[in-house]
Amino acid sequence: MMMNDSVDDLPEVLLVEIICRLSCIKLVFQCKCVSKRWCELISSSHFVGQYVRRQRDLKTPILGTVVVDNGTFFRMENEDGLMSLQLPVISEAAPEQKLFVVGACNDLVLCCPSKVDQRDYYICNPYTKKWVALPPPPRIHNWVSVGFICDPYYNYNSSSTFDDEISINAEYRWRVVRLRQEFYVDIFFSETGEWRESANVVCGLRNYFDIVTAGVACNGKLYFSGSDHASSYILELDPFQDISNISTTNGNHIIVDKCRFSLAPLDMFSEGRGYAISLYRVLGACRRHLRVTEFVLGNHLSVWELDAGDDNLKWRLVVDKVPFFQMDSSYHDDVSMTPIDEVAKTAIAFHPTIEDTIHVEAHKVIRWNFGAGMFELVPKIRGRDGSWNLNYIHPFVLPWWPTPVPSL
């Protein structure tokens, strides 16, 4: 470069190469403020593809954590240390307005100002602080079970080194699903920007009121866990089916024909397993594998995994009766509290990106790698104090490039 030349005089291909080599995505986003040219360049699908390709080649780990229903994120470590995530401010007129997280997929979360009588929904990206409001659903109900799912913003081949193996889904699809009593389902379609009401989605003798968890997105489908007086079950819903597979009645209602129930691992309550005390169950996804636990309070943990592609929702046992760890009370920084190894422990959520790892609540939140037999305290997160619900904990995965909040 000549003495009077500036970095802005560099050709685009070289500028892309330089910015892609920045140490973290936060610095890349800050570069958007340099000039209009830089902003347009970094916002282009070509740049995103190049950046994702470099992260893939460097084998940069994809970070993940969980968020509880009151909007509290468990912190995760990145190149800058501990990353703190918060929901964006929706209303400048009422910045103190409380939002509850009712669904999550990848790095997008679905929020609502209320836990009951839900009417106003927002899709937010806590990393970029962007958000969009959804149109209100057709009817307001005291209770609904909600699921949120979206396509990935980009796809890539982990073994390829070619640019064309990374594709950007600029018009990615997404759905919001509300399960109501009387076997009704409300679905918001991103392609049309409208809610549609499904009727008569009947699966055996089950009732949606028996569902006890929020929807878990995994491999393009939503899963809900439920339990009634007879057994426990998993509901699988495919919200991205072709429109030809949806039949209409009177032009106003749709019937989703790929909504199905299946019993959770059938031997969970069997006498053969010898359990006489209560169990606590967690449904979650880890690295694109749907998992369910059998957690015997204060004793041990078993984990099942869904066999991908099996039409009968068959499960395989991953680990059986892993003894629960005995934790040293010295890990408490508050000596007035009961030592951890003397309190009740409850499994609450799988870690979405770290294999064989589950979060456990025991006055404080602990991250337990049951495969390696190791545990650590989650920084700055105390145990449940009644402000968040054990059944409504959502995964949050921060991909190499943040998902843009959709426009409606």
Image (cartoon, rainbow, N blue to C red):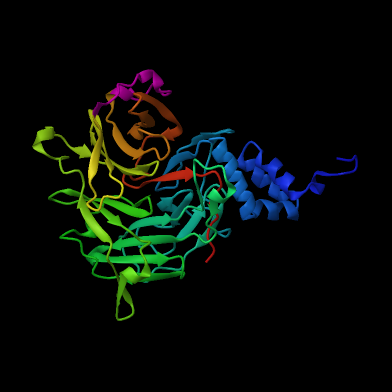
Q: Position of residue 207 (x, y in %)?
A: 20, 59
Would residue 115 be visible to someone looking at this image? Answer: no
**In the image, farthest residue toward the right:** 3
Relative to the observer, which residue lies in front, 316 or 285?
316
- In the displayed structure, 386 sits above or below 372; it is below
Figure quadrant of residue 317: top left
Q: Position of residue 219 (x, y in %)?
A: 38, 50
- In the displayed structure, 349 sits above or below 231; it is above
Relative to the observer, which residue lies in front, 272 or 14?
14
- In the displayed structure, 385 sits above or below 344; it is below
Which residue does the image show at 57% across and 39% down from the upper left? Answer: 55
Relative to the observer, which residue lies in front, 84 or 34?
34
Which residue does the image show at 31% across and 60% down from the upper left? Answer: 144
Which residue does the image show at 28% across and 44% down from the upper left? Answer: 306
Q: Position of residue 191 (x, y in %)?
A: 46, 67
Q: In which quadrant of the rendered image does the N terminus lie? A: top right
For the stretch drawn in magenta, the main secondary structure is loop
Q: Start and end of the magenta stretch?
A: 321-341
Q: Is residue 384 left or right of residue 272?
A: right
Figure quadrant of residue 113: bottom left
Q: Is residue 249 left or right of residue 130?
A: left
